Amino acid sequence: MVCKEAGAKAEAQVQEQIQSLQNLYKQQKEQNIQLQQLLDEMESLRQLETENQQLRQRIQDLEHAVEQRPSQQWGNTMTV
């Protein structure tokens, strides 16, 4: 009789541990999904920053080109 009770108690503990591990797995899976979304956001931001840097460089190049060109060569292009 003691053996049956010990077995039932052990089985209940194993079931409890299984349930606990399943809950932990579910939490980890949710965290992984959230982290992946965060990584995707960060990658998008990194790409935008790279694009911004390229656009800033292009603006500087254009400003430099305008400064290098004598004003008379521009003629009336700004008043069209």
Image: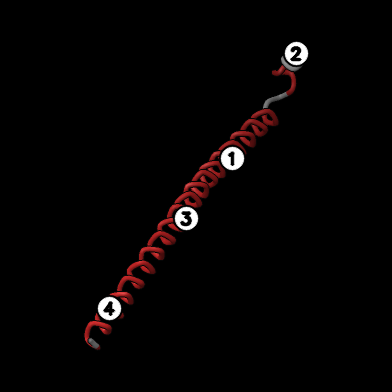
Residue 74, percent from left and from top? 71, 18
Q: Which residue is mark 1?
A: 52
Q: CA distance from mark 4 to mark 1?
A: 66 Å
Q: Earlier in the sequence, mark 1 or mark 3?
A: 3
Q: Nearer the viewer, residue 40 or 5?
A: 5
Q: Which residue is mark 3?
A: 35
Residue situated furthest right in the rendering: 79
Q: Which residue is mark 4?
A: 8
Residue depicted at 47% across the width and 55% down the height: 35
Direction from residue 75 to residue 45 in the image, left or right: left
Element on which disc 2 rests: loop
Residue depicted at 36% across the width and 72% down the height: 16
Of labels 4 and 3, the one closer to you:
4
Q: Is residue 50 above or below residue 21?
A: above
Residue situated furthest front in the rendering: 1
**Please, what is the three-letter code of the amino acid marked with disc 4?**
Ala
Residue 63, percent from left and from top? 67, 32
Q: CA distance from mark 4 to mark 3?
A: 40 Å
Circles 4 and 2, Cβ within 8 Å, touching? The answer is: no
Q: CA distance from mark 1 to mark 2?
A: 31 Å
- Occupied quadrant, residue 17: bottom left
Q: Is residue 14 above or below residue 1?
A: above
Mark carried by residue 76: 2
Element on which disc 4 rests: helix
Residue depicted at 73% across the width and 15% down the height: 75
Q: Earlier in the sequence, mark 2 or mark 3?
A: 3
